Image (cartoon, grey):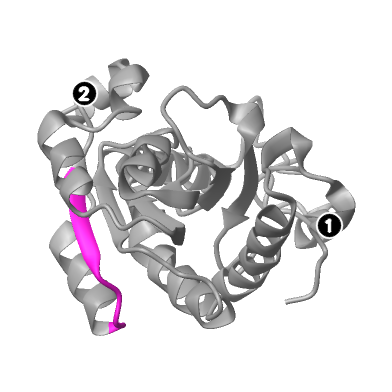
Amino acid sequence: MSETSVDHWHWLRDFTAARIALGRAGNGLPTAHVLSFALAHSRARDAIFTELDVDSLKAECEQAGLTTILVRSRAHDRRTYLLRPDLGRRLDPESANLLSLARAPHSDIVFVVSDGLSATAVQRHALPVLRDARALLRDFTIGPVVIATQARVALADEAGALLGARIAVSLIGERPGLSSPDSLGIYVTYRPQVGNVDEARNCISNIRPAALTPANAARELARLLRAVHFNGRSGVGLPLDTVALPD
């Protein structure tokens, strides 16, 4: 269709953020859609390379009454983090020692907030999820919030083990999509330890205002944590019928 043609397919876009029914202008896409795609691509790249404002997040957490510990992975810069995922899964020696000294056995849950592949998502959504989840988990013993940079999901295994927690919860920025540069993911692991594989985890993903809102994610997380605690396991071994246990 030309730039000025009537768009008979626009109603489909009311049901999805995917790029569908874009039409055409000659042999190409309409200019508006080309520019929209370029903007989305730039936002996704920005999300990957934007650094987490650790000081701001730490201050906001502490204002909300959450004790924090700052750590970093063995990938000490963004380029290394992107090229060496293995280094992002482990704490650097100084951070590991710091958590060892802060060990508090008998903690039920430790939350690890990591920049991951979208610091934007963490900056916007991590604290609301933490705040709401904590209010729903008052009968659990919750350790300090670990804020980790250049971190992958599995770093929460080492952090949780060093802090003596029964359950580690990783809140991490997900890989940006062209319609979702600010998507937060949550990974729950029972008995965290170095070497755990993904089948040992449960995941809640696509947390952002346009999808699963932080408030709803907190409720889902609270239900999931109760199921994990009740069954003493997480991942593929967790019976699906227990995930819907009441709050």
Residue appearing at x 59%, y 70% in the figure: 218
| Residue 159 placement, left or right of 149 | right
Res 162 quadrant in image: top left
For residue 222: magenta? no
Element on which disc 2 rests = helix
Q: Amino acid at mark 2?
A: Arg
- Estimate the x, y position of residue 58 in percent, counting from the top left: 20, 67
Q: Rounded to the nearest whole Å, what is the CA distance between mark 2 and mark 1?
A: 41 Å
Residue appearing at x 67%, y 43% in the figure: 234
According to the picture, the residue beneath numbered tag 2 turns out to be 79
Is residue 190 among what the camera can see?
Answer: yes
Instruction: Indicate whether 127 appears above or below 90.
Output: below
Quadrant housing the N terminus: top right
Residue appearing at x 30%, y 16% in the figure: 83
Q: Nearer the viewer, residue 27 or 210?
A: 210
- Estimate the x, y position of residue 13 in percent, counting from the top left: 76, 56
Res 74 quadrant in image: top left
Q: Pointer 2: residues within 10 angstroms few (<14), some, or many (20+)?
A: few
Instruction: Indicate whether 192 appears above or below 11.
Output: above
Residue 242 bears which disc, if any?
A: 1
Is residue 169 among what the camera can see?
Answer: no
Q: Amino acid at mark 1?
A: Thr
Residue span colored magenta: 64-71
Q: Mark 2 or 1, which is nearer the eye?
A: 1
Do residues under tags 2 and 1 come within 8 Å of each other at their CB atoms? no
Quadrant housing the C terminus: bottom right
Element on which disc 1 rests = helix
Q: Nearer the viewer, residue 73 or 209?
A: 73
Q: Nearer the viewer, residue 210 or 3?
A: 210
